[in-house]
Amino acid sequence: MQKLIQGIHRFQQESFRPLQSLFEQLSKGQNPETLFITCSDSRIDPNLLTRSKPGDLFILRNAGNIVPPHGAPNGGEAATIEFALAAFAVKDIIICGHSLCGAMEGLLQPEKVVGLPAVSSWLSYAEKTRQIVKANYGHLEGDRLLTATVEENVLVQLENLRTLPAVASRLAEGQLHLHGWVYKIETGEVFAYDLTCGQFVPVAQYQHSPSQFDVRRPGAGRI
């Protein structure tokens, strides 16, 4: 705890002052253009990863970067997404998974979360991911299997995202773009799913089109 308190002092003395005019502007309101949905994993810092400033990203985090589909019991995700669209008219939504994801390990090995009923229930929203992996990736194991699961889960959660009325209406109007990313913690690399080639590719090579995720091709490319 003391480390956090010391961090606050350093923030106020070293970080806040150079950005004071920005924070004064933000005190009057925010206008982020991107909703960034990612995992709660402590090793991911969306602002550090994208070199964005306060006010640039509206961030939603949970275990496994999961988006329950429309009609699921309200856990807050749908409300956050709806608010981002209604209040800020965000133009882009990114779902960002990551390597070494504990939630995806729990999905592959349910025995690891058998004593965590809330976690087990939450991972049911990724059951489609588990079924896809079981049907298509039986030849993989270890880290390669986990990587495939992380990637497929990003695509499954994008499908869930499209079921939300607020998202579907903006997509139909051409006012919203969806993106699927995977962050590789151990190398700092970021890969984006490119529908034109059906692969996760280095983000610098990513060619996005507004209709990118109108239709999902079966099977993600491997990192």
Image (cartoon, grey):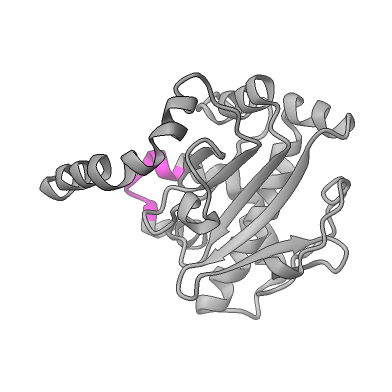
Q: Tell me, yes or no, whether the highlighted magenta stretch contains residue 136.
A: no
- Of residues 62 and 17, the one nearer the viewer is 17
For residue 212, say whether it is visible.
yes
Q: Is residue 173 left or right of residue 103?
A: right
The residue that appears at 56% across and 39% down in the rendered structure is 56
> In which quadrant is the C terminus drawn?
bottom right
Q: Tell me, yes or no, whether the highlighted magenta stretch contains residue 118.
A: yes
The residue that appears at 46% across and 55% down in the rendered structure is 48
Q: Quadrant of residue 106?
A: bottom left
Q: Position of residue 151 (x, y in %)?
A: 64, 62
Position above or below: 112 against 175? below
Q: Is residue 115 left or right of residue 141?
A: left
> In which quadrant is the N terminus drawn?
top left
- Of residues 38 and 9, the one nearer the viewer is 9
Q: Which residues are magenta?
A: 113-120
- Of residues 169 and 50, the one nearer the viewer is 50
Among all residues in the image, which is located at the extreme left?
Answer: 2
Q: Is residue 39 left or right of residue 117?
A: right
Q: Quadrant of residue 136?
A: bottom right
